[in-house]
Image (cartoon, helix red, strand yellow):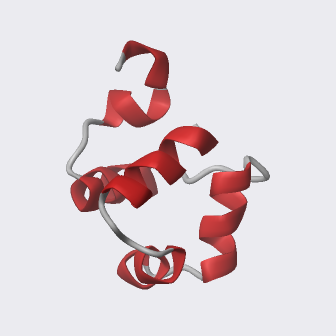
């Protein structure tokens, strides 16, 4: 998931800080998700999908993309 989150963010042309603000979390939270240290919860993934205009499955199971 960590690689996918970073790829989608970069494809959207957004910074970690911008995404953090949109999701009402800290910049550090986004960095931890993208490093694989932690993961967003299901509700946050739904919001991430709206921001990145992608499907839930594309985040959870990137190998199916």
Q: Is residue 50 left or right of residue 14?
A: left
Q: Is residue 4 above or below residue 38?
A: above
Looking at the image, can residue 1 be seen? Answer: yes
Residue ranking furthest to the top: 64
Q: Residue at 47% of width from left, 16% of height from top? A: 63
Return the x and y of residue 60 as percentages of the image width and height: 47, 30
Q: Is residue 63 above or below residue 7?
A: above
Q: Residue at 69% of width from left, 76% of height from top? A: 28
Q: Is residue 60 left or right of residue 39?
A: left
User: Which image quarter: residue 32?
Assistant: bottom right
The foreground one among 25 and 14 is 14
Looking at the image, can residue 43 be seen? Answer: no
Q: Is residue 60 above or below residue 22?
A: above
User: Which image quarter: residue 47?
Assistant: bottom left
Return the x and y of residue 46 as percentages of the image width and height: 33, 50
The foreground one among 15 and 31 is 15
């Amino acid at each position: 998931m960590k690689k996918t989150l970073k790829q989608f963010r970069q494809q959207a042309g957004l910074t970690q800080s911008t995404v953090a603000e949109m999701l009402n979390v800290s910049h550090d939270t986004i960095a931890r998700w993208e490093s694989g240290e932690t993961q967003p919860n299901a509700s946050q993934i739904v919001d991430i999908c709206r921001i990145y205009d992608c499907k839930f499955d594309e985040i959870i199971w990137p190998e199916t993309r």
